[in-house]
Image (cartoon, grey):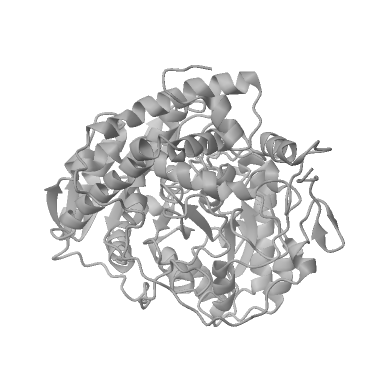
Amino acid sequence: MAGTSELDVAYVARLARINLTEDEAKIFQKQLDDVLKYVEKLRQVDVTGVDAAAHTLPVFNVFREDAPRDWFTAKQALSNAPRQANSLFVVPKVVE
Amino acid sequence: MTGNELAALSIADLQSLLRRREVSPREVIDALRERIEAVDPEIGAYLSLDIDAATKEAEHANVDLPLGGIPIAIKDIINMMGQPCTCASKILHGYRAPYDATVIEKLRAAGAIPFGKTNLDEFAMGSSTENSALKSTRNPWDLSRVPGGSSGGSAAAVAADQAFGALGSDTGGSIRQPAALCGVVGLKPTYGRVSRFGLVAFASSLDQIGPVTKTVRDAALIMNAVAGRDPQDSTSLNTPVPDYVASLGNDLRGVRLGVPKEYMIEGIDPQVRAAIDAAVKQFNSLGAEIVEVSLPSTEYAVAVYYIIATAEASANLARFDGVRYGYRAENPKDVLDLYGRTREEGFGPEVKRRIILGTYVLSSGYYDAYYLRAQKVRELIRRDFASVFEKVDALISPTSPVAAFKFGERVADPLQMYLADIFTIAANLAGICGISVPCGFAQLDGHRLPIGLQLLGKPLDEARILQIAHAYEQSTDWHKARPSIASTLPKV
């Protein structure tokens, strides 16, 4: 589905693992085309020689002892699982 | 004292009563519960309330601790062991938190009673709380208007005296903007000042937890309890936490306040502008020096934000796939069908839109044009602030260009909704701290609607902006005004 930007909502939704109805894809296409048109203004900015800021405050390494500590038991970790068996999460077959 | 009068107290006043043993923590919980039962059917601030757990905690509360026996409401995106944490999304249906967020542990260590989970825009994505998949929250000043967002439940609960104080989270203004629209105080701390361990992540380079309160002093009290280094959040800063309450005072002599000329734009409601102009005069009369300053990259902030925040959200929300917790689509035919349908049925439209946009700006062929460029412009925005903070102690602006808007007014046009955050998002991009305090009222359709003043401060300079906000607050009566819902409902 072509909009005014290069974004193809139906294709990107598949990448993001979100099923969309055709109607939803059509509405999102229009709305996100508008947003992408708005962010075009960033092209006007001269960013020559500017470092990309992934963080705004000084970045530092954080170390801790590589030692075991108490954390969830298997039972706690599975306490919210929609489906489980034998202390494991159940998912549809992944490998044919 | 009636239950309503008790519920209307600030944290500081409640603390004095508790310490003098004039009221017990149990009586406080009872009064609050009655208030919530009377008011919340109108307001809709809470998603869940565990009265029994709070009552039990109240029985053992130590009122001599800094927040001893004081109930604090929690935005329902912060994990509290044994309680739901819905993020106002269907995708977390049935989830119960198996652990406590660090802020919950810290509140308890200070004697507070975390009580009640408040409504929000789904996964904190929104500026009106209309994106909650679970319920509507109304503005206590005018029930036909939104409370702002995304921490709309926290702000509405505090404004309607259904909470003494609350925690919210702020990724682009989600504490400050609803605080402004509901007439209460909201503080976004510096990035790294408060641990996010146990906060469901939206945009990890922007998210911070902070207080929503009736007064500036109360915000300082909560900050004293929750700020500080946490080994469980490697982005939390290992910098000593000052006593935020001790730094409060009324003298602003020698303080330099900047008014960014780019923030006084067209599109600000004239009544908001008039209130800010009056506040600037008030600061001046309190002894502060007012300086015009420039933040030249301001006009790019919203664009940068909606690239970076959505990119990070698309990665963070990948974890909701129907396997480990929450909602799962029925009878999936294979694993891709499980993911695709779980996320189709579990997420609301705004969350889907943002995940799609974020996936797109990170995708091969578009990464440099969108994400990388946005990060570079983000650096320019950060430098703007670093440079003006060499000249001034804090910046003044409106928190929101408009007072509370009507339900439905902006939902059809996401871009218009995004522009509601125009004055707040730069602080998240630059990592600095900001606070919103009440500074007047707009008159609209016969209703008085609160206006918020924003003060932005240097990194880790929360004590300074709290001090400036407190001096202003104490020289005005705005924070004493209550919405009429507080008096018209039947006495409990």
Determine the residue positioned at 48% across, 24% down: A31
Residue sitting nearer the eye, B59 or B455: B455
- B317 displayed left or right of B206: right
Seen in the picture, residue B143 relative to B318 is either above or below; the reply is above
Determine the residue positioned at 67% across, 40% down: B134
Residue sitting nearer the eye, B20 or B297: B297
Residue sitting nearer the eye, B286 or B327: B327
Determine the residue positioned at 81% across, 52% down: A90
Q: Visible in this render: residue B371?
A: yes
- B333 displayed left or right of B8: right
- B243 displayed left or right of A84: left
Residue sitting nearer the eye, B108 or A79: A79
Q: Position of residue A45 (x, y in %)?
A: 22, 37
Q: Position of residue B357 (x, y in %)?
A: 48, 34
The C terminus of chain B sits in image quarter: bottom right
- B131 displayed left or right of B344: left
Residue B5 in which image quadrant:
bottom right
Q: Position of residue B271 (x, y in %)?
A: 30, 34
Residue with the most extreme front position: A96
